[in-house]
């Protein structure tokens, strides 16, 4: 309840996957940009046709309306304080305080959202930056103002809490109270909660420092591009560089990237170390044995689920190493280096997608697979400018969907015209539909779905979409591209996340046991992990360890395992769809409407998946192995075939794909603080 960040600001998502070092594929291109109705890159945001830009005025009409909302929220903060010390015997007081805190959370969430999405589409907009400053300060004050509510309720005797669960007037809050009851042991006195709430802004500091350094202050180097031109190597451009067919360009690009991370490595590492130490401090204050225990407890997920994920990967390293070996053979290189990990195994297989052609393809998929209720949300999203499609100077990299309660979701894309971008659109639409269905079916306090369930929604859709596209392709080369995409998706969304999780566990273990976290120690941990995961056919140098600084998710404290778990659950739900299970559409939509009104594992169970069943997790690695074997055969067939991937924009379902490298945005996902 005290947490406006997790409830009031339903989280942004995300990222289907992240790592460029294992990212795939493909050179964009047969379809020249000029053949699309739209351009791919616009110099100025104003040049982008309005229908491809989202419309913040749906939240607040203008700055004046924003200022009015800020004034109203500020005025309500003292009123919130009037409930302090009164939450006990009178149930109506508890209900009123909950209502007041949620209304404050809703209004401040909307203010923060409005400011932040405008910073995201134009980082150099001074007006947006000023609003964001106002909104951030207001958010911190509001968090302090409501911080007593949860501790006061938690301080009630167990018998009183049990009685509250039975009272009719508390019915709308039954799950909230149950959660308080469940986590009572970790909720501190109101004074301590006040300190924790006050520290919220401080604990977000390291991430902001890192973001500013990476996105604003560092002057990123240039290298010679495919045609000898200067290409700047930045966190945002590196994904594309890593997929280039020009090996020397890839090598130089990676070397320049790593050199820059190394040059700023002490500062960036100190920033990450401070973040980790801050989280470890919160875990300690709350009486957890570790930050991992806290992260799992927040979503009420058993450690058994995470342990079985790690064990499933370690037990199948052979399958992962076989894929590295296949990559080495397919590329025909004597030595395979990390800069070879992103390039397509099906060179020149990628076609260019115009956004509106891709949109038509995706709409067909949504309608066929999920039905009208789902498809109509998607249709509304584009028609009403919920989607910001194209990159422009000053816009954040990557893709996400985000929403403030009482408003429609907003989707940010950076359309590049690859199949990867089509899959990203499908992934993010999974979030948009989920947010929309949850918000239209749940009150504010159950609107903040956990990342865990959010990613299940998008991964289910994403996996089904790739299968759907493979089924419709008759071109062997194209099918090879798609299979490659499916393998890379499993690797990026499942395997890499487990690797990242292991990295997090190692550095948190150091922090929680008083050992130093430095550039050198963290690089060494990372290098050991990537070496173990990729096996003997990938050759690493000592300098590769610094790549950990490229992963923004380490600022999200034990967030990455969620991707892996969600992938496993999403794949299990997708299997139900593939088997023609009649009830699966209704079950899936029911899950999307639950929000946080039930615990995540229960929500997934509504869609027919029990993550405590080891079989569910185990099947992911079986699928990875099967996909890899199919890919190997498809590559053989494709190399024999003379066919060329069609470039017709009308060839619906004809798709090749680059694996997404998307930067996750700096959004407040801190829970319990
Ligand atoms: Zn996502």
Image (tube, rainbow, N blue to C red):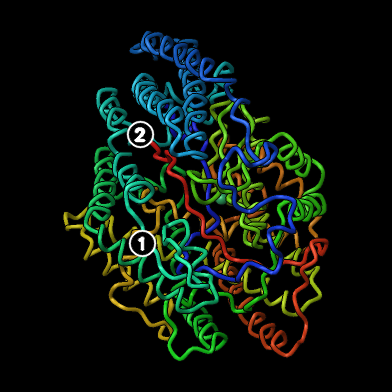
Residue appearing at x 73%, y 55% in the figure: 36
Q: Quadrant of residue 422?
A: bottom right
Residue 324 position, x and y percent, is: 49, 81
Please tell me which residue lies in front, 13 or 654: 654
Q: Quadrant of residue 600?
A: top right
- The label shown at residue 580 is none
Residue 524 position, x and y percent, is: 26, 69
Q: Is residue 297 above or below residue 636?
A: above
Comes first in the chain, label 1 or label 2:
1
Q: Is residue 581 above or below residue 167?
A: below
Q: Which residue is mark 1?
A: 221
Residue 485 visible here: yes
Q: Is residue 528 above or below residue 235?
A: below
Look at discs 1 and 2 and give the one toward the viewer.
1
Q: Is residue 219 above or below residue 183?
A: below
Secondary structure under tag 1 reads loop
Residue 605 position, x and y percent, is: 62, 49
Please tell me which residue lies in front, 484 or 170: 484
Whether disc 1's CB lies below 8 Å from ligand 1 is answered: no
Q: Which residue is mark 2?
A: 673
Residue appearing at x 71%, y 84% in the figure: 638
Secondary structure under tag 2 reads loop
Do the residues under discs 1 and 2 have CB atoms within 8 angstroms? no
Circle 1 Cα neighbour tier, 10 Å, few/some/many (<14 / 14–19 / ≥20): some
Q: Quadrant of residue 614?
A: bottom right
- For the image, the number of numbered tags is 2
């Amino acid at each position: 309840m005290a947490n406006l960040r997790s409830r009031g600001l339903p989280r942004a998502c995300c990222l289907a996957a992240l790592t460029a070092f294992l990212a795939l594929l493909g050179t964009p291109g047969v379809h020249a940009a000029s053949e699309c109705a739209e351009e791919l890159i616009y110099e100025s945001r104003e040049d982008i046709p309005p229908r491809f830009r989202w419309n913040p005025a749906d939240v607040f009409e203008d700055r004046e309306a924003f200022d009015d909302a800020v004034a109203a929220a500020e005025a309500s903060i003292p009123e919130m304080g009037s409930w302090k010390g009164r939450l006990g015997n009178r149930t109506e007081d508890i209900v009123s305080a909950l209502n007041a805190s949620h209304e404050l959370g809703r209004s401040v969430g909307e203010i923060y959202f409005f400011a932040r999405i405008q910073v995201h589409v134009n980082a150099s907009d001074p007006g947006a930056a000023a609003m964001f400053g106002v909104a951030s300060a207001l958010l911190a004050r509001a968090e302090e103002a409501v911080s007593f509510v949860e501790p006061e309720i938690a301080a009630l005797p167990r018998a009183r809490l049990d009685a509250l669960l039975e009272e009719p007037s508390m019915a709308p809050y039954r799950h909230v109270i149950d959660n308080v009851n469940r986590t009572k042991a970790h909720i501190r006195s109101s004074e301590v909660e006040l300190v924790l709430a006050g520290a919220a802004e401080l604990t977000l500091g390291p991430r902001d420092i890192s973001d500013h350094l990476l996105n604003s202050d560092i002057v990123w180097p240039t290298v010679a591009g495919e045609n000898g031109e200067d290409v700047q190597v930045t966190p945002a451009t590196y994904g594309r560089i890593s997929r280039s067919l020009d090996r020397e360009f890839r090598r130089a690009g990676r070397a320049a990237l790593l050199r820059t991370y190394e040059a700023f490595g002490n500062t960036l590492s100190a920033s990450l170390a401070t973040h980790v130490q801050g989280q470890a401090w919160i875990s300690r204050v709350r009486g957890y044995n570790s930050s991992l225990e806290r992260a799992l407890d927040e979503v009420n997920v058993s450690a058994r689920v995470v342990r079985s994920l790690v064990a499933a990967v370690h037990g199948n390293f052979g399958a992962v190493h076989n894929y590295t070996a296949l990559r080495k053979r397919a590329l025909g290189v004597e030595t395979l280096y990390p800069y070879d990990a992103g390039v397509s195994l099906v060179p020149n297989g990628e076609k260019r997608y115009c956004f509106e052609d891709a949109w038509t393809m995706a709409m067909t998929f949504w309608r066929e697979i999920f039905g009208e209720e789902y498809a109509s949300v998607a249709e509304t999203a584009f028609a009403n400018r919920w989607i910001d499609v194209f990159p422009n100077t000053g816009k954040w990299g990557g893709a996400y969907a985000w929403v403030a309660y009482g408003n429609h979701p907003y989707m940010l894309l950076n359309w590049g015209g690859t199949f990867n971008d089509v899959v990203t659109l499908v992934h993010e639409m999974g979030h948009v539909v989920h947010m929309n269905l949850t918000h239209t079916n749940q009150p504010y306090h159950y609107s903040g779905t956990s990342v865990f369930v959010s990613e299940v929604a998008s991964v289910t859709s994403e996996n089904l979409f790739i299968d759907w596209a493979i089924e419709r392709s008759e071109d062997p080369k194209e099918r090879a591209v798609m299979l490659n995409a499916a393998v890379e998706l499993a690797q990026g969304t499942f395997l890499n996340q487990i690797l990242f999780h292991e990295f997090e566990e190692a550095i948190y273990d150091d922090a929680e046991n008083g050992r130093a976290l430095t550039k050198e120690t963290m690089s060494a941990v990372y290098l050991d992990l990537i070496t173990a995961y990729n096996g003997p056919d990938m050759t690493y140098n000592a300098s590769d360890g610094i790549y950990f600084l490229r992963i923004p998710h380490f600022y999200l404290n034990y967030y990455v395992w969620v991707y892996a778990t969600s992938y496993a659950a999403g794949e299990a739900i997708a299997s139900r769809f593939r088997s023609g299970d009649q009830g699966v559409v209704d079950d899936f939509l029911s899950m999307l409407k639950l929000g946080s009104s039930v615990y995540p594992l229960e929500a997934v169970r509504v869609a027919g998946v029990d993550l405590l069943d080891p079989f569910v997790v185990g099947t992911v690695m079986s699928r990875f192995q099967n996909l890899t074997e199919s890919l190997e055969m498809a590559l053989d067939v494709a190399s024999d075939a003379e066919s060329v991937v069609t470039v017709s924009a009308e060839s619906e379902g004809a798709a090749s794909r680059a694996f997404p490298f998307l930067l996750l945005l700096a959004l407040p996902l801190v829970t319990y603080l």
